[in-house]
Image (cartoon, grey):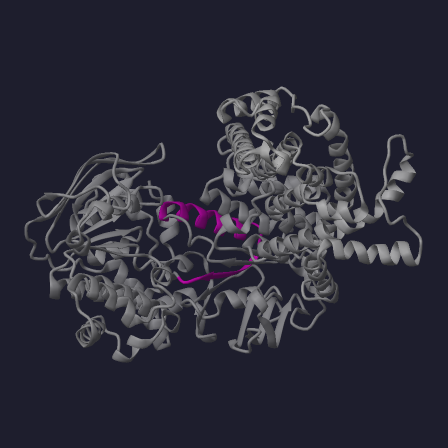
Amino acid sequence: MLTLIAKRAVLGVFTLWLVSVLVFAGTEILPGDVAGAILGQSATPESLARLRAELGLDVPALQRYAEWLLGFVQGDMGRSMASGQPVADLLWPRFWNTMALAAYAGAIAVPLAVGLGIMAAALRGGIFDRVSNVAALAFVSLPEYFLGLLLVLWLSVKTGWLPSLADTYDGMGLAAWFRATTLPMLVLVMVTTAQILRMTRTTVLGVMDQPYVETAFLKGLRNGRVVLRHATPNAAAPIVNVVSFNIAYLITGVVLVEAVFNYNGLGRFMVDAVSRRDLPLVQAAAMIFGGVYVFLNMVADIAAIALNPRLRHPRGKEA
Amino acid sequence: MSDDILQIRDLRVSTDSGVELLHGVSLDLERGEILGLIGESGAGKSTIGLAAMGYGRGGCRITGGTVQLAGKDLASCTRREREAVRGARIAYVAQSAAAAFNPAHRLEKQIIEAPLYHGLMTEAEARAWMVELFTALGLPEPETFGRRFPHQVSGGQLQRAMVALAMACKPDVLVLDEPTTALDVTTQIEVLRLLRDTIRKYGTSALYITHDLAVIAQVADRLVVLRHGQEVETGPTQQILTAPREDYTRRLVSERQASLSAPAGAAHKTGQELLRVEEVDATYGKAPVLCGIDLSVKQGETVAIVGESGSGKSTLARVVAGLLPPSRGRVAFDGAALPPSYRKRGKDLLRRIQLIYQLPDVALNPRQTVAEAIGRPLTRFQGLTGGANRAEVLRLLDQIGLPAEMADRLPGALSGGQKQRVCIARALAAKPDLIICDEVTSALDPLVAEDILRLLRRLQDELGITYLFITHDLSVVKRLADRTVVMQKGRIVEEAETDRLFAAPEQAYTRGLLASVPQLDPGWLDSVLTAP
């Protein structure tokens, strides 16, 4: 089992390396001449050459890639082209903002969704199952910025319960922070809950057709106990997968929600960097997003391996 | 009778689409009695067994009649009342313990769950009782056996653990649904004995469901013969076996007798050596499966390869078919070396070696009609299209004994035996020299299997085909094979003319295998067990 996990980890590192190649190629090589893009109409051959030398663009791409990657691995993400500040100083606070919101939403969405999904499976065909299914479908189909605007309209504009903008700043109190971020959190919870709920329900129901579930019923157990004790443990691996996928979304896919609520997260950071053509910032943010994705998928795969009793308790041991 | 623990009266069960599976079945089970339910697949045996627990599989419902368990009618009582009885007073032993145990929990957790849940025992009592059952069932290290997960024990052990699971609440009635069918013959004997002894020891009553008359003869006091959801006849085991009243029962009994005492067929005219396997080793990954196999098959001959699961017999078939290239050794066909992988074999070589599988349901494309399935090899190997193709399909259907109107049916509209016939016709369409039959009758009911064997035999007489017959069923071997090869753990243990092998087996393993085939005589199990 340990070798399996080690293999998966090595594969994760390899994927990250591929991501770095794509990010570098995408930002440095594809758009053509960066210096030209920055100077635009006012470019003269002399100023172009000067800027290229300044940015280090006169060096071959492969060498630049190697230097960039080496620096990145050591925590040096380079300097912002626009402000000259180290990328790390600009990026990490935004990253932690995003992580905080994701943690807030995830801590509520995951238990809620898995619980509701199992309940829907246990009450298959009942009124709860149908209502939760329709609601989940509606939340999945509505764009998140639309959901966000609806919540702003109801919970902020009409009732004034919550602030419509998620302004956060250093040194704000915990209560104030929760108040500020509750609206975006609600949107994220709605979207992720819907997906996890539907997936959980489907997997648990898939397991319900197994002969060992029939065995449980023939022991005289009640439906709820059969679902919880006998079906759910065997549905865990796919559930972990969809949960990790949704957590990854909470971290990397929340640009629109951040925009609606004007939240200082990594998604908006990256969009701003792209519009300013601040390539080191874009590269760093893209690498962070890629890293989060790869890491969470790796965790899900390892969890699936660890949850498999055949791998956890190999034959012939502990007899 | 007042001493009946279970009384079923005029039981009707229907699927949720309204098809009636049981058309009014009645039976009585006395305290301490073992009642055998016997019949072919679709006879409704399992449906009765589950209905006795007030349970319907996959949307089936009890639509009429009563199921009185110790005076309480499970057909009409509330769900809560049914749940209180299930597992506690009446418990179920499934055919495949491997599927019936939850892979996520340790055995002990699953076994003591019901007594704790029903509030019948304390945890200490339940555990002590479990260990006692493990001991009675001859499981190794009964104190710690329950700590294992289902995948950590063998099939035979798991089947016995399943009995412990069912007995956990000391139920009045056990429903045993083909409890030994999935086991190898030598394992079956052991499980059968322990089952019978355990049931008798604790005075439990049992409904024993099986399609194998010889097996049920060893354990049941009385038999109920079922067909198409109806009772055919009921009587003491001895009477059903020796003096069946109904024609259907007579056929069942005589088929089983014939299969056990069949004279080997007349020797075939055999020709030159067609297939030669020399010093073949094969592995799955790193695990060795075949070790130094030598085999020679002559033109027109039937060679049976028998062995228990894990003996490597199917792997040998895969090597010959080119599905698994051997790691060492050579295979020659008709005097020329056979490329190890089917990908390297030319069209003509592929044509000359055909395979028929165990499960005709899976081997046929459900969206292809019979004519399409048989017509494809005709087009590919003989270039027949249009009317000529159709004519040849009809000729083949006639040859395998299916009416012409079957040609345009989909496999879903055919019975198991008919599907296997279509598979045979598809193999014949290639005009093969060698047909590899991998457990071709194992999934079929006895009377149907009998017909298929007769068909294969006739085709051999007519066409001079050579068969390589892979099977675990020794009665099949006896009826069909000229020569028999016994395999164990990837090696050939013994090889001889079938007659000689059955009359005077040389190896202890072969003798054990032959002795393990259940006989119709109800005293057989005891005689085997007391034999030296």
Of residues B447 and B439, the one drawn nearer to the viewer in this rendering: B439
Left or right relative to B221: residue B476? left
Asked whether residue B204 is drawn in magenta, I would say yes
Left or right relative to B514: residue A283? right
Q: How many marks?
A: 0
Where the C terminus of chain B falls, by quadrant? top left
Whether residue B402 is situated above or below residue B279 in the rendered picture: below
Toward the bottom, the furthest residue is B405
Of residues B456 and B197, the one drawn nearer to the viewer in this rendering: B456
Residue segment shown in magenta:
B185-211
Residue B238, given in percent of the width and then of the height, sits at 39, 65
State whether residue B111 appears in this view.
no
Residue B447, given in percent of the width and then of the height, sits at 32, 68
- Residue A236's quadrant in the figure? top right
Q: Measuring 18% from the left and 59% from the top, which residue is drawn there?
A: B263
- Residue B280's quadrant in the figure? top left
Of residues B44 and A54, the one drawn nearer to the viewer in this rendering: A54
Where the N terminus of chain B falls, by quadrant? bottom right
- Majority secondary structure of the magenta segment? helix
Residue B188, given in percent of the width and then of the height, sits at 41, 49
Q: Measuring 39% from the left and 69% from the top, which residue is drawn there?
A: B240
Of residues B292 and B326, the one drawn nearer to the viewer in this rendering: B326
Left or right relative to B25: residue A282? right
Whether residue A41 is situated above or below residue B169 in the rendered picture: above
State whether residue B434 appears in this view.
yes
Asked whether residue B24 is drawn in magenta, I would say no
- Residue A303's quadrant in the figure? top right
Residue B378, given in percent of the width and then of the height, sits at 20, 66
Q: Measuring 41% from the left and 56% from the top, which residue is drawn there?
A: B218
